Amino acid sequence: MRVFASDVVKKMMGRLGIPEDEAIENSIITRSLESAQTRIEGFHFDSRKQVLAYDDILNRHRQALYGQRRHILAGEQGVIDEIIAQVTEAHPEISETVAQRKSEMGDTLWYDIMRRVALQTYDHLWVEHLEVMQYARSNVSLRAYGQQDPLVEYRKEGQRLYAELQRTALDRLAATIPTIRIERVVQEEEKQKEAIRLAKEAGGGEEAAVADKPDKPIHAKPEFARNETITITSNGEERTMKYKKAIPFLEEGWKLK
């Protein structure tokens, strides 16, 4: 009532001096209350509609990426071959490396490793994409001062960022494939077999060994802020980037300089 009622109603409420525990039966005041309720419901409806419109844009990205992730997770060779073809098309210089790694590992091991690497890459990028989209959403509201529709601008910015996510995924896969070594894969398999054997000897069984084993190697990492710039190296190659983007490379064996 303070927001939507007219000054006449406010003055009338003050003059009448109606007690707080007495029902309001005046028709003018009742109509004003109903009008205020209708207007405030309409205001909140518009707010919810606006929030839903923004969420729908991000939900389209989510459905597209989750669909792509489900295909990768199914482990079909055609899906992995398509991803590798996109990587080699964007980075022709690694074509020979891809052929060499596939020949060394054999089809079964090669497709299994590439499925895991692709899933890990897209998972990391999706988390970053959510953060960037949240930042973009808070910024596009300022474009209304330039006579631009914030929702339209958010949709355009979202399309650009999602396309950038796909390009970045190919770049990271191209950087990761040369670091894959058959020796490291064999060592990891031997460690798993040894852990299972020790667990069986101790009476814990195979399930206990798998439960106690971490999903991936634990790296002792110094404390860095997510947006802090660091330099990493691998086989004489150096790269400078933000710490949050360097995490996948560190997990693949790159070292801090």
Image (cartoon, rainbow, N blue to C red):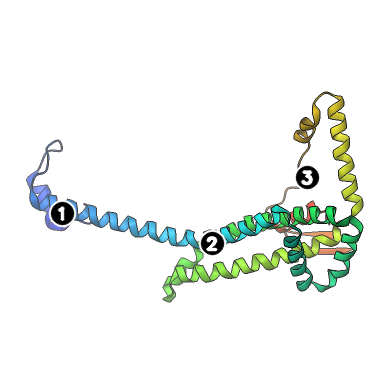
Q: Is residue 256 visible?
A: no
Residue type at mark 1: give it: Ser
Marks 1 and 3, how far apart in space?
65 Å
Residue type at mark 3: give it: Lys
Residue at figure coordinates x 12%, y 48% from the top left:
13
Say above or below: 209 vs 109.
Answer: above
* Numbered label attached to residue 216: 3
The one nearer the camera, 233 or 53, is: 53
- The reply to whether the C-beta atoms of the residues labelled 1 and 2 are less than 8 Å apart is no
Q: Secondary structure at mark 3?
A: loop
Residue type at mark 2: give it: Arg
Q: The C terminus appears in which quarter of the rendering? A: bottom right
Q: Secondary structure at mark 2?
A: helix
Q: Residue furthest top?
A: 203
Residue at figure coordinates x 45%, y 69% from the top left:
150
Say above or below: 114 vs 149.
Answer: above
Residue ID for mark 2: 60
* Numbered label attached to residue 32: 1
Q: Is residue 212 visible?
A: yes
The one nearer the camera, 24 or 160, is: 160
Residue at figure coordinates x 76%, y 68% from the top left:
87
Of labels 1 and 3, earlier in sequence is 1
- Classed neighbour count for the residue bearing mark 1: other residues with Cα under 10 Å, few (<14), some (14–19), many (≥20): some
Q: Residue furthest bottom?
A: 147
Between label 1 and label 2, give the one nearer the viewer: 2
Residue 172: image quadrant is: bottom right
Residue at figure coordinates x 82%, y 61% from the top left:
177
